[in-house]
Image (spheres, coloured by chain):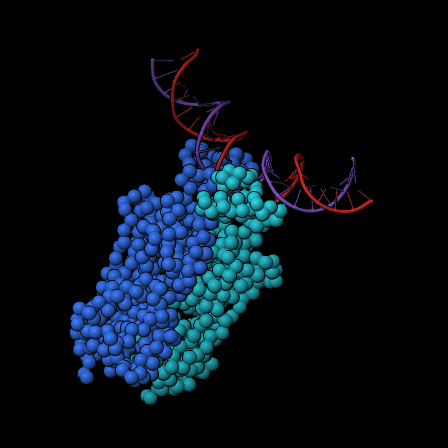
Chain colours: A cyan, B blue, C purple, D red
Amino acid sequence: MRHVASLAGVGIKTVSRVVNGEPNVSEATKTKVLEAVRQLNFQPDMHAGNLRRTGRRTQTLGLLVGNVANPFSAAIHRGVEDAASDKGVAVFASSLDDDPDRERGVVSAFLQRRVDGLILTTASQSQAYLQPELELGTPIVFVDREPVGVVADAIVSDNANGAAVAARHLISHGHTNIAFLGDRAEIWTARERRRGFVEELGRAGISINGLSLVDGLYDDVSAERATDALLKGPNPPTAIFSAQNLITMGAVRALRNNAAHHRVALVGFDDVSLAALLDPAITVIAQDPQRIGALAAERLFARLDGDTTPARSYVIPTRLIIRGSGEIRNDS
Amino acid sequence: MRHVASLAGVGIKTVSRVVNGEPNVSEATKTKVLEAVRQLNFQPDMHAGNLRRTGRRTQTLGLLVGNVANPFSAAIHRGVEDAASDKGVAVFASSLDDDPDRERGVVSAFLQRRVDGLILTTASQSQAYLQPELELGTPIVFVDREPVGVVADAIVSDNANGAAVAARHLISHGHTNIAFLGDRAEIWTARERRRGFVEELGRAGISINGLSLVDGLYDDVSAERATDALLKGPNPPTAIFSAQNLITMGAVRALRNNAAHHRVALVGFDDVSLAALLDPAITVIAQDPQRIGALAAERLFARLDGDTTPARSYVIPTRLIIRGSGEIRNDS
DNA sequence: GGGGAGTCTGACAACGATGTCACGGGTTGG
DNA sequence: CCAACCCGTGACATCGTTGTCAGACTCCCC
C-alpha cells in the first residue's frame, strides 16, 4: 500500500479510502490510485486491515466435517460453501476422522486464524472446552452430532426416528430377526440410530435377545466382514438395518457374495449414490446433508448478525425411500 | 497477549517467547506465563504475528476444485488435506462450478487472505493473470487441468491416453459405432478425452462420420437426456464412452430405461462408487484423484521449501478396470 | 468581505504480535 | 579482581492497514 501511495503520489490513507470505496475522494485521485493499484497488482492484506478495523471480521469460517471425501460430509460442505460464498466468506474445511485429538487440533488451528465462527462435527466426549470461546462471542454451530457440555445451536438429522421408521418398515414386511450394523458407539449418531431401532423393536414386542446388534464398524470393509460373518453364522438374519452409508456399501457387497441379496432384506441409513440402479435397488432412510450445511451456515450468520435467541437444535427430517431391498418379505 | 503479560507479571515479549517456545526463559517464568495463558484461554493471533515475522507464512493454502461435493474433487481435497495437516497447514476449499468469474473471485479472496500457495482447478481461458503473483513468489500448482498462459506445475490425469484405452477396448469388442458423451468443450479435460478418443478411432481406421460425438453435457440429467436421445435416434450406438463421472451415471440410467444395458457397451471415464455392484458392473478408466491432490500438495510444499527446478506437468496414469459393461460384444 | 459549512487530504496512533537491542546480574577464567 | 561472556528480561520500533483528527481549500450566503 505504501508503494501504491508513492506511485500514485498520494498518502497511504487515501489509497485505503479508494480501495475500500470510502467517500470524499476526488475522481482525479481515485483514477490515479486505481491505476497504481493495477500496475503494482496490489491486493490489500485483509488481516492487517482486520487488526485495526472495528468489528473485526475475517470473513472466514471454520468447518469440520467427518471426512471431506465422504459424500455425506461433502454435501454438508457444499451447503455451507454456498451460503458462505454469497456473503464473501471463505471456508476452512477439515476432516475429523472421528479422532478427538484431531478435533481439538483443528479447532485450535481455526481459532488461531481468527475465524468468525465455527461449524463443527465432534468426536470428543465433551465440548465444554469451547465454552470460553463461545462466551467470547465466537458463534459455534454443531452439525450432524449434538454437542455435550455446552449450549449451542446444532443441526442434526432425525436419527432415532429415521432408524425407527427403518425398523418398522422391515417389521411390516414380516421380519423379526433383524440385524443392526452400526458405527462405533462413541459416535452420537450411531447411538441415536441404535436407540431408535431398538425402541421400535420394543414397541413391536420383538425381543432383542438373539438378535445381532453389531457396533464398532468404522468403514465399508469392516462392515462387509461383519455382514459376512452374520450370514454364515448360526442364526442368520432375514433383514439388515445398516446405520451408515459406508456400512451399507459393505453390507451390499457381503449380501452379493453370499448370494443373499434377493433373500435378505436391507434398509440403509443415509442415501448412497447409484443405490437406485442396483438389483435390488436399495431402500434407504435418506438424510439431507446439503440442507444441514446450509442451515448451519444460516444460523451462524444470524448469530454474527446479532441474533441472541436461545440456542437450540434443529432436527432435519429423514425420509424413507422405497426402492426394493427393504421390501423383501420374510418367507420363513 | 497484553492481558496474559500483566496477569503473569512479565513483559509481553516474554509471553511471546514462551508461546513460541523460544529459548532463554527461566522455568519459573515459563510456568507463570503458561498458567496465565490457561486462565485467559489465550490463543495467539497468527495473522498479527505474521505481520512482523520474517518469512511471513500463514500456514494456510487455498484449494479450488471443480465441486467439493463431486467425489473426484472430494478425493483431491482429501489428498491435499492429508499432506497439509501433516505440516500444520489449514486449507481453504472452494468450488469452481466451471465458472471463470468464480475462479477469479476465489483466487482473489485467497490472495487477500495471504495464503502461502494455491492449488487450482481452472475454468477461465487463460491464467496469465496469475503471472505477477507467481513472480512475487506465491507457488501455484494446477490440478486436473493444465494452465494456459503461465508456466507452473500441474498435476493431471492421463486423459487422452485413458480415453484412447477406452476406445481401443470397445473396438476390440467389435464396436465401430461408438458414441462419445463429453463435458463442455471449454473444459481442458473434456477436450483431451475427446481428442484421445477420436485419435484412437483414427488409428483403428474408423471414420467418425456418422458417429455421435456429444459435447456440452454438464450434469447427470443432461447426460441422461442425451443418451436417451441417442438410443431412440436413427442410428443408435452399439457402445458408449462417457467421459466424466456424472455423465456415466446419466448414461447408465438412460441405458436402463431403454432396457439397453445388456446390449449396449459402456466404458466410463473416472470411477463411480458402487460401479462394481451394478448389473452389468461398469467398466471404467479409473483416475487416482487422491494421489493428484497429494502430489499437488507435495509439489507446493517443495516450492515453498525453495525448490526452483523448472515447472513441469505430472501425468498421473489412469487404469482400465474391467467389470462387464465394457465387454459387451457387438453382435450385429 | 468574513464566517460557516463542506470537501479532500495526509500525519499519526493504534491493532497484536515479533525482531532488535540494551540492560542487569551471575559465572567463568586469566 | 576485573574483563568477557552468557542468561533472562523488557522497551521500543515495526509489520500493513484503518480510525481519528486537523489542516487546506472551495463554496456559499449574509
Query: Residue visible at 42% across and 76% down?
Result: A285
Q: Nearer the viewer, residue B303 or B207?
A: B207
Report the number of numbered marks. Answer: 0
How far across and how far down the image is residue B297, in percent?
Answer: 33, 52
Query: Residue visible at 44% across and 64% down?
Result: A78
Give the answer, above or below, for where A160 lies relative to A17. below
How far across and how far down the image is residue A155, in percent?
Answer: 50, 66
Q: Nearer the viewer, residue A255 or A275?
A: A275
Picture quarter containing residue B251? bottom left
Picture quarter containing residue A304? bottom right
Is residue A210 in view from this perspective? no
How far across and how far down the image is residue B19, in percent?
Answer: 46, 40
How far across and how far down the image is residue B237, in percent?
Answer: 26, 79
Is residue A292 in view from this perspective? yes
Query: Residue visible at 61% across and 49% down?
Result: A23
Q: Nearer the viewer, residue A284 or A116?
A: A116
Q: Quadrant of the C terminus of chain B?
A: bottom left
B166 sits to left or right of B121:
left
A261 sits to left or right of A13:
left
Give the answer, above or below, for where B305 lies relative to A147. above
Q: Residue furthest bottom?
A: A331
Picture quarter containing residue A209? bottom left
Give the answer, above or below, for where B33 lies relative to B257. above
A83 sits to left or right of B148:
right
Query: Residue visible at 37% across and 52% down?
Result: B128
